[in-house]
Amino acid sequence: MLKAKSTKSNTSRRTFIKVSLAGAAAWLPDGLIPDLLEEINKPKSPNDKDWKQIRSQFILKKGVTYMNNASLGMPPLSVVQAVHKGYEAISKEPLHGKHDLQEAIRERVIPGLAETFGTNDDEIVLTRNASEALHLQTTALKLKKGDEVIITTQEHPAGLRPWMFRQKQDGINVKAVFIPSPLTSESDVLDRFNSTISPLTKAISFCHVTRGGHLYPIKKIATWAREKGIVTLVDGAQAIGQFPLNIHDLGCDAYAVSLHKWVLAPAGTGFFYVRKESRDRFQSPFDPNPSTDAPGFDPPGTKDFPTRAAINAALGFINHIGLDQVEERCRYLSDHLKDGLRQIDGVTILSGNTHNLSAPGSTIFEKEGLDAMAAVPLMEQKINTHIDEHQRDGHNAIRVSTHIYNTTAEINRLLNAL
């Protein structure tokens, strides 16, 4: 598993968490102070009993089980209240409320994201989601007619459509390399890229973690591509927040993020990263006269300030827990699910059978005689549980994406229903 290379002391990390929590307090109603998170016992193990206090921070309707986090994460109460407080601020005093929210985004949210995910402040701009960031990195990449870009057969539509646009608009040659599902090995993925490129290849575009939870060896791919002068563009929507990562250490040139999935930030939040040393490979789609210091990647216009300021509350929450413990908990739950699936006749698990090939939180599988599309409403009807389908890559699969707020009891109920 890719881990962040820590260059700062534990004292620095504790200081950041306190600053993040204190910053979130500015956007919470009276009586709800994020510093109280410090009084919640940090889980000592991945077991359910040690996550009871963490689970209490979520306000999911009683009787409902949510196992579709890979689609949209479920924010904790502190994030919900932060959004409320932000809208209250611009409703009571629009001018000063707006300025205060902008200051919070500039002084807390951007530095908090950079600190948590290993970037510089000036390498990221906020977006509504990874789809918007993917569109930015695709349309901003400097390419000319006849240049070649390699994508994979496992791309999300949000990652595929921008390339179809550039192919039609600019005459870019887009080639798809077939990647099997599940992945067979890290070296196989790299070999497939290596055998597909040509002297015309200028960039490769792929997922860090696919919609189905397959984990790509991104650092190895980025290192190989850099040696060949090929730009690496990464869809990180399903990766960020599932495990610790340092984007600088990954070595990619651009990285697209949704924060409303595994980071548990408000819906409609994400960011776009461009490595500082790679800016000359991109051209702003907004600014006709960009510079190295002001690359102009930030979409212009009025932003959704309350939801963006509330990202700080989400960062405070996940950093209080620790992304290493988030990864351990997610892996514990998905392993429990996989162990149970192996006991059911007719079930084929499609997620990678080793941790280096599969993400911690998402599991895909097929069940003989059960249509994946039909299974989604069926599980809601039978056990009030939300899951998703994965009819892609030749599969008629079900996707279950469990996060820290799920339990083994909920998983057992799903297994019994299956």
Image (tube, rainbow, N blue to C red):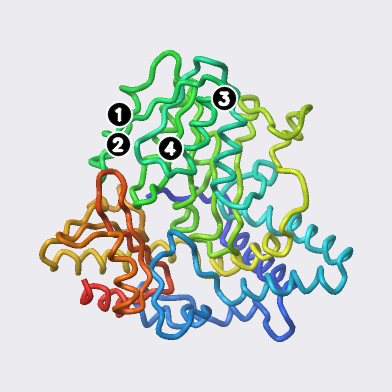
**Dot 4 alpha-carbon crowd within 10 angstroms: few under 14, some 14 to 19, many 20 or more:** many
Identify the mark at residue 169; answer none if there is no mark: 3
**In terms of image quadrants, where is residue 368?**
bottom left
Q: Which residue is mark 4?
A: 206
**In terms of image quadrants, where is residue 92?**
bottom right
Left or right of residue 145: residue 367 = left
* First along the sequence among labels 2 and 1: 2
Q: Position of residue 9 (x, y in %)?
A: 58, 57
**CA separation in Å, label 1 and label 4:** 13 Å
Q: Position of residue 186 (x, y in %)?
A: 29, 38
| SS for callout 1 | helix
Identify the mark at residue 192; answer none if there is no mark: 1
Q: Which residue is mark 2?
A: 179
* First along the sequence among labels 1 and 4: 1
- For the residue pair 338 and 366, the one nearer the viewer reads as 366
* First along the sequence among labels 2 and 4: 2
**CA separation in Å, label 2 and label 1:** 7 Å
Q: Residue at x 76, y 57 (%)?
A: 107
Q: Mark 2 and 1 residues: CB-CB less than 8 Å, in contact?
A: yes
Q: Residue at x 62, y 71 (%)?
A: 79
**Dot 2 alpha-carbon crowd within 10 angstroms: few under 14, some 14 to 19, many 20 or more:** some
**CA separation in Å, label 2 and label 3:** 27 Å
Left or right of residue 32: residue 195 = left
* First along the sequence among labels 3 and 4: 3
Amino acid type, callout 2: Ile
